[in-house]
């Protein structure tokens, strides 16, 4: 098929690689460009922003087949307030919360709350709209920054103040056709910049899958208690959910609870989950669009996959770009290199973003996959390059 992918980060390069493996002709389009998709037989949307703006509604109106939720369905990610109230309506486990659309009542609520809180700008904020304050003073400062200083613009017009949960985090994504839900392998991201989960939050410094934290039985349980009720609920509310539904879960002592829903593949999760998918992704996407996912086989490779993100010096703060990347030619063939923030000039590849490359490898075990991915990393260099040395390490003996 002729397929267009919207977006151009690591996730989208993983999508392109996966589709090319099955003989499809794939073009990529920058997410910020308006897109008519007329020559594509299938359009797959990577990032949340175009989905929240209604790109799928537009493409479908033009008669283009698009894999991803409509604007109404993408509210599960685009409005955390909507998502929280939705979860309440359908009994989906999540942290206790309150929603505010002005500062003074939110401020009063903070003074009364008898539990540690998390403060979230309700709208899309490029992954930066969540503050986990260390103390009461920080909580007040965060609320002020979001609602008074408008640090995230209109994304902070509404805030969710919720109970802080504890436990390890797992990303469970699923294919959805509006009715049927097929979970993917569970994955784990590493959000902090530095080893030992230290340093600032990032877009993700590495990932692996499958996560040992969810057994196949746990996945079935999450499907029936979280993913299926969500898809059933959206259908009942007149916004059937087609595409990838991503549940960010915290495994608390009271069971898995939803931290957030995303309306797309996770990044870097896509860079480890797609290499584990055996079935042609275009076949699955078409089955989702046509509402026949229930009859579609979705098969996975055995073993594990790991991905190490190579970031620019200074990321997630300020960093330089335009630095030459050395060694890509020397990386063995069984290592997957997903370009996240690169550009080509006459001399070859140069850096062009905070997260520059994802280096992924499959192996018979997590230990094996990690060893291969890190061996791949050892060939690559650019000035200031930094990456975590401990992706997956905590979970090797789980
Ligand atoms: P979100 O974008 O809502 O997933 O939040 C980003 C990150 O903030 C999550 O991956 C968690 O590490 C943390 N977080 C969000 N909500 C909570 C919560 N209720 N309790 C503890 N940590 C949270
Ligand atoms: N890895 C987290 C996300 O894609 O939102």
Image (tube, rainbow, N blue to C red):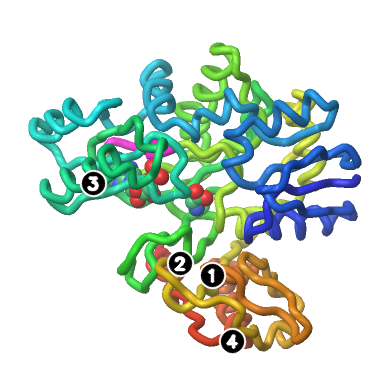
Element carrying mark 2: loop
Quarter of the picture containing the C terminus is bottom left
**Circles 2 and 1 in contact, beta carbons < 8 Å:** no
Give how far apart the Cα atoms at labels 2 and 1 are: 13 Å
Whether the magenta-drawn stretch holds residue 247 is answered as no
Give how far apart the Cα atoms at labels 3 and 2 are: 31 Å
**Image: magenta residue range:** 254-260
Q: Residues within 10 Å of mark 1 (few under 14, many from 20)?
A: many
Element carrying mark 4: loop
Judge whether residue 208 can be spotted in this image.
yes
> What is the total number of numbered labels drawn onto the structure image?
4
- What residue is drawn where x is 50% and y is 22%? 229
Q: Residues within 10 Å of mark 3 (few under 14, many from 20)?
A: many
**Circles 3 and 2 in contact, beta carbons < 8 Å:** no
Element carrying mark 1: strand
* Image coords of residue 240 (percent x, y): 62, 20
* Up-down relation of residue 168 to residue 321 (above or below): above
For marks 3 and 4, the one nearer the N-term is 3
* Image coords of residue 176 (percent x, y): 65, 31
The mark closer to the camera, 3 or 4, is 3
The residue identified by callout 2 is 392
* Up-down relation of residue 220 to residue 292 (above or below): below
For marks 3 and 2, the one nearer the N-term is 3
The residue identified by callout 4 is 381
The residue identified by callout 1 is 309
The residue identified by callout 3 is 142
Among the 4 quarters of the image, the one containing residue 45: top right
């Amino acid at each position: 098929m002729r397929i267009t992918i919207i977006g151009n980060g690591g996730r989208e390069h993983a999508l392109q690689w996966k589709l090319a493996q099955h003989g499809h002709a794939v073009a990529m389009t920058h997410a910020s460009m308006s897109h008519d998709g007329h020559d594509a037989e299938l359009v797959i949307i990577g990032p949340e922003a175009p989905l929240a703006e209604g790109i799928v509604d537009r493409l479908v109106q033009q008669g283009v087949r698009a894999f991803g939720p409509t604007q109404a369905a993408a509210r599960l990610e685009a409005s955390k307030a909507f998502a929280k109230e939705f979860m309440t309506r359908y009994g989906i486990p999540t942290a206790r919360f309150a929603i505010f659309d002005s500062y003074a009542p939110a401020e009063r609520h903070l003074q009364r709350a008898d539990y540690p809180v998390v403060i979230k700008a309700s709208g899309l904020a490029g992954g930066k709209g969540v503050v986990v304050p260390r103390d009461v003073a920080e909580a007040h400062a965060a609320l002020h920054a979001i609602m008074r200083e408008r640090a995230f613009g209109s994304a902070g017009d509404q805030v969710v103040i919720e109970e802080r949960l504890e436990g390890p985090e797992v990303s469970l994504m699923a294919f959805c056709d509006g009715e049927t839900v097929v979970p993917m392998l569970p994955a784990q991201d590493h959000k902090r910049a530095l080893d030992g989960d230290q340093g600032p939050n990032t877009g993700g410094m590495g990932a692996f899958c499958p996560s040992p934290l969810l057994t196949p039985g746990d996945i079935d349980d999450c499907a029936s208690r979280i993913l299926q009720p969500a898809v059933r609920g959206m259908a009942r509310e007149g916004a059937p959910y087609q595409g990838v539904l991503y549940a960010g879960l915290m495994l608390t002592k009271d069971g898995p609870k939803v931290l957030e829903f995303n309306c797309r593949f996770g990044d870097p999760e896509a860079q480890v989950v797609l290499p584990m998918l055996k079935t042609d992704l275009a076949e699955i996407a078409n089955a989702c669009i046509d509402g026949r996912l229930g009859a579609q086989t979705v098969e996975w490779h055995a073993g594990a996959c790991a991905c190490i993100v190579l970031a620019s010096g200074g990321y997630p703060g300020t960093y330089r770009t335009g630095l030459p990347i050395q060694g890509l030619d020397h990386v063995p063939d069984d290592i997957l290199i997903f370009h996240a923030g690169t550009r080509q000039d006459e001399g070859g590849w140069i850096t062009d973003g905070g997260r520059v490359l994802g280096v992924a490898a499959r192996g018979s075990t997590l230990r094996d996959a990690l060893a291969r991915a890190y061996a791949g990393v050892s060939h690559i260099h650019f000035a200031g390059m930094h990456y975590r040395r401990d992706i997956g390490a905590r979970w090797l003996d789980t």
